[in-house]
Image: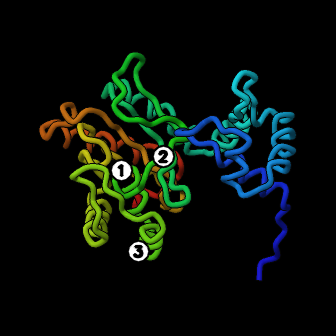
Amino acid sequence: MKPDYSIRVLMRAAEILNCFTAMEPKKSLVSLASETGLHKSTVYRILETLEELNWVRREEESGLYRLGVGIFELGSRAVSGLDFYNVSRPFMDDLVNLTGQSVHLVVHDNGEALYLNKIEKPGAFITQPSSVGFRLPLHCTAVGKVLLAFMSKEEVEAIIQKKGLPRFTEKTIVNKDDLLRALSEVRSKGYAIDDEEIKVGLRCVAAPIKGHIGNVLAAISVSGLSSYFNDEKLPELCQVITGTARKISSELGCPSHAL
């Protein structure tokens, strides 16, 4: 059995930090105690330390807490240490200039699609509620289906068991067998399409970024209004995104037979 070297106070601090989300960036002491199940005095002492580290900040007027810039700096250092993050940046810029649409870099994290980077033209019409650090379900996003497609069937089924297949639009895949067939098609074609499956009026095309042993590290996507991603233009966009993903993968040392 693996030894437990965890330190309780660090685990408690992590529980508190994980309470802050994109949907609820501000929290009260009472709500943090309620969500974590910790005593208010314990939460308060931990928050005091986190404030000293600049990992959280307390607003004077409201008394609410939010994440501090120290967490952002720490996260930025973590992300910048990922080879595929740095390598993909110029290719993402090229995609934005070529398509004029939003471009994302996404990884799998704990059964969800975690957005590491997002680039769009200044003044572009924002069609997807995404941002760096944002999380979305895997089964109804193009990036998510790409990430799922290259997992084992056991991993996919475990995620389905844990997260379910919630419906967001009439086109959302909510049946496991339908999803497995869709993932098989993604593996065959080398790209995935989100056809208004998470938001009506939005389409997205994604392809896998692979590492030096051919394993999928991340997914890259282009997303925008369905009127732009029409049936006439979609095949060309699929070629563009798969070509870009292959170039990034090649830069990362992916063998040619695995591209």
The residue lying furthest to the bottom in this view is 1
Q: Nearer the viewer, residue 44 or 74?
A: 44
Tell me the crowding category of disc 2: few under 14, some 14 to 19, or many 20 or more residues within 10 angstroms, Cα based: many
Numbered circle sitting on residue 106? 2
Say what amino acid the circle numbered 1 marks.
Thr
Q: Nearer the viewer, residue 245 or 35?
A: 35
Q: Nearer the viewer, mark 1 or mark 3?
A: 1
Residue under pointer 1: 141
Q: What residue is at 68 percent from the left and 43 percent from the top? A: 78
Residue assigned mark 3: 153
Label 3 environment density (alpha carbons within 10 Å; few <14, some 14–19, many ≥20):
few
| Picture coordinates of residue 161, whole percent (x, y) | 44, 71
Quadrant assignment, res 83: top right
Of mark 2 and mark 3, the one earlier in the sequence is 2
Q: How is the image coloured?
A: rainbow
Q: Amino acid at mark 3?
A: Lys
Distance from disc 2 to disc 1, alpha carbons, whole Å, reads 11 Å
Neighbours of disc 1 within 10 Å: few (<14), some (14-19), many (20+):
many
Looking at the picture, does residue 154 appear above or below residue 257? below
Q: CA distance from mark 2 to mark 3?
A: 21 Å
Three-letter amino acid code at disc 2?
Val
Secondary element type, mark 1? loop
